[in-house]
Image (spheres, coloured by chain):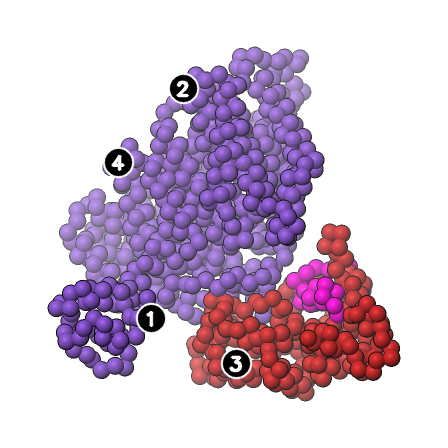
Chain colours: A red, B purple
């Protein structure tokens, strides 16, 4: 059974239809990619899934439960975590305090009452180390590089121990080595049994780690498949390039987008 | 039946005037995203200007109207947009609220300065000429008001849909940055919106002043009626705003007209005056959930938070200082020390709410009043009575926040303004509290059986309370709750997706803040022995907010300094009545300047030691090498005997000093 089921979701902003009857599923314990050209409605989909945007129509099911109208904070308690395309780190807190807030909240009232103990600091350091930004622990979050702030958002989301992790362009701002390490982290997280849905423009990363990919164009899902199938899909090539090149074995999509 | 018709006519007149005021508010808010709390105050000011022209200077009415509506008011609107409101639309709501509250207080100050309180009246248009429709009598003034409101509606419609700049205004509502990219000029659009808005406020003020009286506060508070009407169109929809204004005006007229027929109505004498407020709360409850804002607020540089140890030492020093002061001062001055402590504690409630939480309240003195009344009414001058007073104020604070649970900070602040007025006019005047401005007696507090009769001892005790609350506030800031508050302020969307339910957090924050204000009120009641409704009127809450912003709303030091100056303000005004209004203007201007830096003047104090050490001392040492004394070295360098150093070499050994330049 899929962990997440987006069912026939429509989002209209005035006259503009940002998401048009999008339906897709995310299997439990897998890494799923959500790709598409700019303005295809990927981030809007994320906002609908996490509750920041109410859909005009359609449903969102988490583990079979309809959460379409559930308030944002309660979705977090149901095991949903996310990062943002436009950075949403808590700028005036330090990097470690960003994670600490998430830990406090995750533990509820107990977290609020508890004095700062060694175990908490250890847990924070572990999380920062896991995403590879331990060196920035004591800096203010609005003073670190973009890539670091993105990884911080991942660490912060992980602090709440999510079942479903939604990552919105996590690799932008990372260099090649950092992206490689990040890919390994994603595979580790999936091996732990976490489910990941990722909007990403770095096709090398997407092709490397994703089990399944959904392609969004003009608000609708135009293709779904394994990385291999998506790579060879004429429909996808058309969406990205405006024409399809059936004869080309090497995918122009990858280079075009990754550049 | 004729009674009903004549109430309806009066209602249509009132509604028409509200509609004119409200459409100006909507125009400025929707094009520039700045909610102008001073909108009513602008109307007030220009009603006075019009009175000055037409009555005092005897300029013909038509010329006075042209001068006010088409010259003075639009120029003033452009000035406000250019100087005060520029860039406010994208600033946090708390900043734009503080700026416009500063404007409001400044305008009241200007009016009081130029036109000191005396009996003035503004005649109605065509006074004495009446129209008889059967039994119903209506005035020309009413007819003109209704006609003008229709003309304003048509004018705005033509402006917004028939002209290029009107189209740009509508585009600006959605996205001013995008408008700029497409060649529109958002600054021109904004200036025009403020000019028209200001002119409409002036027109509403001139039309309503003959009816409600040429008063500083009553006209200023018309913003509540305008705001209530505009709420029906969510502050952006003009036709709905007109509908809301008419519903409000007619409803209010019926209540005023028929209430006298209902028994016991004399128990609530203020009811007619608060109809707009009640209307407003009713609409607020019906508004849909506001979405969480996506888009990070740039992290603010907060005032340094001292360690608890440091804070305890400073607190002890403060208490010792007040003890010394108390031994030297006499009765009335001791009361002032206690009053300063009261205000400082109320300011602490703002440090928690505004400084840490980022929410603005315009009703802190109302909460203080609830605490004071509760303390006086239950008549238990001990810690139990004090606790009950605090809880009562906290409960009332939560009650204000709950109806606006689903809405944004702007609506919360406006709800507090409306609530403050509701309490001023209705509850504080009822038998539950002061019952028609009667004083209430309260006894001095006893702590564990020890009654603090002496004013000096009482002032010291209040200072101790200030220190305790300050320590609590600081502890909150450094604890998990403080981090969560900052997180919600910096990025509501991210905080929400982590599982923070900011709605209930906000209710809790409001309750806590109101509780602190209630504590201050209760202590104040004990200090004074008698309290009156005037002590807790809403205008004081506005002054308090501005004072807090000027002195620094992010630190307890700012609260202490703000409390002292808040106490001193009325003293200075009664000592120098000739500049009483000017002091309000000064405060308003100060708040407008400092609104973007919430750390305020207190921040200068925090910078002082570093500045002395890094800039002043080396500068002196350079000019007067002979005076140089051995000083604390700041690195790992060995202590140097500076008497033998030349100024240049001193800079070499002190990298901090060089870096600081």
**Same-subunit check for callouts 3 and 4:** no
Q: Quadrant of the N terminus of chain B?
A: top right
Q: Residue at x 25, y 73 (%)?
A: B651
Q: Residue at x 37, y 40 (%)?
A: B585
Which chain does the residue under circle 1 lie in? B
Which chain does the residue under circle 2 lie in? B
Quick check: marks 3 and 1 in contact, CB under 8 Å? no
Quick check: marks 3 and 4 in contact, CB under 8 Å? no
* Residue receiving disc 3: A133
* Residue receiving disc 2: B56
Mark 2 vs mark 1: give the one in front.
Answer: 1
Instruction: Identify whether A15 is placed above or below B531.
Output: below
- Secondary structure of the residue carrying tag 4 is loop
Q: Earlier in the sequence, mark 2 or mark 4?
A: 2
Q: Relative to B629, is A135 on the left or the right?
A: right
Residue B189 visible in image:
yes
The residue lying toward the viewer, choosing from B443 and B333, is B333
In the image, residue A203 lies at what x, y percent?
Answer: 72, 78
Residue A72, located in which quarter of the rendered image? bottom right
Q: Quadrant of the C terminus of chain B?
A: bottom left
Query: Neighbour class for label 3 at 10 Å: few (<14), some, many (≥20)?
Result: some
- Secondary structure of the residue carrying tag 1 is helix
Q: Which mark is residue B659?
A: 1
């Amino acid at each position: 059974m899929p962990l997440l089921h987006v069912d026939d979701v429509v989002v209209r902003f005035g006259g503009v239809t940002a998401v048009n009857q999008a339906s897709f599923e995310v299997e439990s314990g897998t890494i799923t990619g959500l790709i598409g050209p700019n303005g295809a409605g990927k981030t809007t989909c994320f906002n609908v899934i996490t509750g920041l945007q109410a859909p005009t129509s359609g449903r969102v099911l988490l583990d079979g439960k309809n959460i379409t109208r559930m308030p944002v904070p309660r979705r977090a308690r149901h095991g949903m975590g996310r990062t943002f395309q436009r950075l949403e780190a808590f700028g005036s807190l330090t990097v470690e305090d960003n994670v600490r807030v998430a830990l406090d909240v995750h533990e509820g009232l107990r977290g609020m009452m508890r004095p700062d103990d060694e175990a908490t600091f250890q847990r924070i350091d572990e999380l920062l180390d896991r995403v590879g930004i331990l060196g920035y622990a004591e800096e203010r979050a609005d003073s670190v590089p973009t890539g670091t702030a993105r990884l911080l958002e991942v660490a912060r989301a992980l602090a709440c121990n999510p079942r479903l992790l939604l990552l919105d362009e996590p690799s932008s701002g990372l260099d090649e080595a950092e992206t490689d390490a990040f890919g390994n982290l994603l595979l580790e997280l999936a091996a732990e049994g976490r489910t990941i849905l990722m909007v990403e423009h770095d096709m090398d990363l997407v092709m490397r780690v994703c089990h399944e990919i959904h392609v969004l164009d003009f608000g609708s899902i135009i293709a779904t498949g394994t990385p291999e199938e998506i790579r060879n899909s004429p429909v996808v090539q058309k969406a990205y390039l405006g024409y399809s090149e059936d004869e080309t074995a090497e995918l122009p999509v990858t280079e075009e987008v990754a550049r | 039946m004729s009674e009903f018709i004549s109430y309806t006519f009066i209602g249509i007149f009132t509604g028409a005037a509200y509609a004119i005021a409200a459409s100006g508010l909507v125009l400025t808010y929707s094009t520039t995203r700045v909610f102008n709390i001073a909108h009513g105050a602008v109307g007030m000011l220009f009603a006075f200007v019009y009175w000055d022209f037409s009555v005092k200077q005897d300029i013909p009415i038509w010329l006075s109207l042209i001068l006010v509506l088409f010259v003075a008011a639009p120029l003033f609107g452009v000035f406000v947009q250019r100087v005060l409101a520029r860039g406010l639309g994208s600033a946090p709501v708390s900043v734009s609220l503080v700026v416009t509250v500063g404007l409001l207080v400044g305008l009241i100050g200007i009016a009081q300065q130029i036109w000191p309180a005396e009996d003035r009246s503004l005649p109605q248009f065509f006074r004495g000429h009446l129209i008889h429709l059967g039994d119903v009598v209506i005035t020309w003034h009413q007819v003109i008001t209704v006609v003008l409101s229709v003309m304003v509606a048509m004018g705005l419609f033509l402006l917004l849909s028939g002209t290029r700049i009107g189209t740009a205004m509508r585009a600006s509502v959605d996205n001013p940055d995008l408008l700029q990219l497409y060649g529109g000029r958002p600054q021109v659009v904004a200036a025009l919106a403020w000019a028209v808005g200001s002119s409409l406020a002036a027109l509403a003020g001139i039309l309503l002043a003959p009816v409600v009286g040429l008063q500083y506060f009553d006209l200023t508070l018309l913003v509540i009626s305008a705001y209530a009407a505009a709420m029906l169109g969510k502050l952006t929809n003009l036709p709905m705003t007109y509908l809301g204004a008419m519903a409000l005006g007619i409803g209010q007229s019926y209540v005023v007209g028929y209430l006298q027929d209902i028994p016991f109505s004399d128990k609530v004498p203020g009811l007619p005056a608060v109809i707009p407020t009640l209307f407003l709360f009713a609409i607020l409850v019906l508004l849909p959930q506001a979405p969480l804002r996506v888009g990070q607020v740039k992290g603010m540089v907060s005032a340094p938070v001292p360690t608890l140890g440091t804070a305890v030492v400073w607190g002890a020093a403060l208490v010792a200082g007040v003890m010394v002061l108390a031994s030297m001062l006499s009765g009335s001055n001791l009361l002032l020390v206690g009053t300063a402590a009261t205000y400082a504690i109320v300011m602490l409630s703002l440090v928690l709410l505004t400084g840490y939480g980022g929410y603005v309240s315009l009703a802190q003195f109302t909460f203080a009043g609830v605490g004071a009344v509760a303390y006086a009414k239950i008549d238990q001058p001990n810690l139990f009575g004090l606790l009950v007073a605090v809880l009562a104020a906290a409960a009332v604070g939560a009650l204000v926040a709950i109806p606006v649970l689903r809405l944004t900070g702007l609506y919360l602040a406006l709800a507090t303004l409306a609530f403050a007025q509701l309490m001023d006019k209705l509850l504080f005047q009822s038998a539950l509290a002061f019952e028609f401005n009667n004083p209430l007696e309260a006894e001095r507090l006893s702590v564990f059986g020890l009654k603090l009769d002496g004013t000096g001892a009482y002032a010291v005790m209040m200072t101790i309370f200030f220190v305790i609350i300050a320590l609590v506030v600081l502890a909150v800031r450094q604890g998990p709750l403080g981090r969560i508050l900052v997180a919600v302020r910096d990025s509501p969307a991210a905080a929400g997706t982590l599982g923070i339910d900011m709605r209930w957090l906000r209710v809790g924050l409001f309750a806590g803040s109101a509780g602190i204000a209630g504590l201050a009120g209760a202590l104040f009641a004990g200090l004074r022995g008698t309290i009156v409704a005037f002590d807790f009127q809403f205008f004081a809450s506005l002054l308090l907010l501005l004072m807090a912003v000027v002195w620094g709303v992010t630190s307890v030091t700012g609260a202490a300094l703000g409390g002292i100056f808040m106490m001193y303000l009325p003293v200075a005004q009664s000592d120098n009545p000739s500049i009483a209004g000017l002091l309000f203007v000064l405060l308003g201007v100060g708040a407008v300047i400092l609104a973007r830096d919430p750390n305020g003047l207190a921040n200068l104090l925090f910078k002082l030691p570093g500045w002395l050490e890094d800039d002043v001392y080396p500068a002196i040492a350079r000019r007067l090498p002979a005076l140089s004394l051995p000083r604390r070295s700041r690195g790992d360098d060995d202590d140097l005997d500076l008497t033998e150093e030349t100024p240049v070499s001193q800079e070499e050994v002190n990298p901090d000093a060089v870096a600081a330049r």
